[in-house]
Amino acid sequence: MSVQAPRKQLKPLPYLLIFPTAVFVALFTAWPVLLSLYQSFFRQRMNIARFREPTFIGFGNYIDLFSDPYFIQTIKNTLNYILGTVPISIVLGFLFALLVNRKVRGIGFFRLAFFHPMVLPMVSAATIWMFFFTPDYGLFNTALGLLGYTGPQNWTGNPNLALLSVIIVAIWKNSGYYMIFYLAGLQNLPGDVYEAAALDGANGWQTLWQITFPLLRRTTVFISIVAFIDAFRTVDHIFVLTSGGPSRGSTVLLFELWQQRFEYQDIGASAAITVIFVVVLLAFTVTNFILSERKEA
Amino acid sequence: MTAPHPTPRAFLKKLAHWITNSLATFLAVLWSIPILWALVASFRPANDPMSRGDVWFSASVTTENYLHAWSLAPFGQYYINTILVVLMVLAVQLVTIVLAGFAFAHFDFLGKRGLFFFVLLQMIIPTAALLAPNFATIRWMGLFDTRLAIAIPYFGSAFGMFLMRQAFLEVPRDLVDAGIIDGCAWWQLILNVYLPPSVPSLVAFGLSSATWHWNEFIWPLVITNSDKSRPLTAGLVRFTQLGEIGARWTLLSAATLMVIAPLFITFLIFQRRFIRSFLHSGLK
């Protein structure tokens, strides 16, 4: 092959190079979205003989979902899960980064302690936590007992506490991940700003909230996006700890999607939930994109 | 804090230092308890059940839990499945992302922007959200309950493509032009000019991809149905639900640690590389 002239051309080579990637994206990202959109307008339930063949019902699946108190409960749980995990994990990530960003001997141990849950499979983490939440002798209750806690002990079996227990596991697992982004941000901060602040007599606390935190705003925005998407797509610990229960107290969107498709065999409803899922993610990404464009303009 | 200090300012500084250290130590210990506890429990004799407060090492230490867990479920097969899936995904991804990243970085062609955004769709919509329709596709392809079925949706990676494109764009134009004048074919340009300085990006992507697929659960769960294809994560959850396991924490801890061990030990050895790769793979 002779000299490449890398200007606008209709040569086949670049298309051939992108072809493998594009095919897999088409097959496993674009096609499933279209298929779900189509299926969401049909009633099709594999476990009921007369509904096995798809019948067009328009928006029927969506109407059914939004008039189903269980689905409303799922949406509430999902919002609570996001509100419960995202802000606290981010604050802890920031705190960890501050604690680890010091020139002290053995600081590597602290970093390891905070970060290691990230590398564990969520199902393994949840299996370990299962013991912690055990009534009576579980470590979690024992520790809470020392602090004077006398409330319900069976965390994963209590409709009011089940969601909280999966939230706790998620916070434990993710905070260290967010720490490393803040750590990278802290290490890239300009030193002269701090010298100026010190000359002005600012104390450590003022420096932290009036200089460090605002300078890391972009990092915070970025971590929020990652955390939000992660909260949506991780349900592994729910499988291990609560199976969405009790009384659907810890069912979130993706778990309900799995349940509709693989337990209730309801193709139409699961397709509708997939579409809702995709719309939320697209709306979230587009909003972020527009907001960040506007700020940079 | 009774020793006399020369000035109140120095005293405050020392106090702040002390508080920071205590807080860091407290949180680090708190965060490490789960994994340390699992380690302790996995070496406790099974006939010495845990009770309130008594959760530390027993009088004797034993490996019987590991042997017993190994005999209760085909963990050897699960290991093979997980390792093959991870290697399969990595091998294909490394080729597809380098080729696509190169095409987007090096060439200008009709529809480039459109194709780029099309591929990026995969970064916006996580594969987990599409498990119902993808299940139908895999059934239709006749791949249900195979290792290939677990791996195939990840053969193209928008994120990897993006990472490689960024790395390739950093390569000085002069170097590329020199290669072109020397008469390099496109694949020689990739191998001799673009790839050498981009190896760190490739390693970073590889580590995070391997971690991700070692740990993945929900897709393998729905797409496998037998031990011949089931990976470690899905195998572990099945194991926890076995009738005879119940609340036998020593056994569960041993099984959990077996699932974690290979990746976790690799992580402990190459800690800095892992952290850098996670950092890299987050900073889009």
Image (tube, coloured by chain):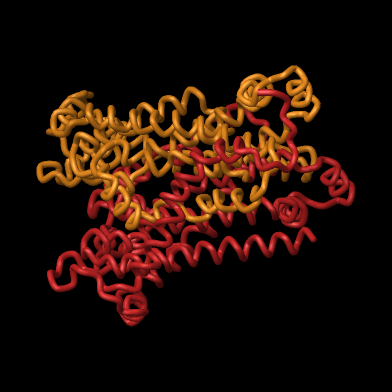
Chain colours: A red, B orange
Q: Position of residue B281 (x, y in %)?
A: 57, 40
Q: Position of residue B206 (x, y in %)?
A: 50, 31
Tell which of A292 and B143 is nearer to you: B143
Write down the quadrant of residue B3 in the picture.
top right
User: How many numbered discs?
Assistant: 0
On screen, residue A105 above or below B111: above
Q: Residue at x 47, y 58 (%)?
A: A85
* Picture quarter with the N terminus of chain B: top right
On screen, residue A278 above or below B164: below
Whether residue A224 is visible to the viewer of this picture, yes or no, is yes
Tell which of B120 and B3 is nearer to you: B120
Q: Position of residue A255 (x, y in %)?
A: 33, 60
Whether residue A100 is visible to the viewer of this picture, yes or no, is no
On screen, residue B282 above or below A248: above
Write down the quadrant of residue A13 in the picture.
top right
Tell which of B2 and B168 is nearer to you: B168
Q: Is residue A4 left or right of residue B134?
A: right
On screen, residue A82 above or below B224: below
Q: Residue at x 14, y 73 (%)?
A: A50
Q: Residue at x 44, y 48 (%)?
A: A172
* Picture quarter with the C terminus of chain B: top right
Q: Position of residue B123 (x, y in %)?
A: 53, 50
Tell which of A266 and B215 is nearer to you: A266
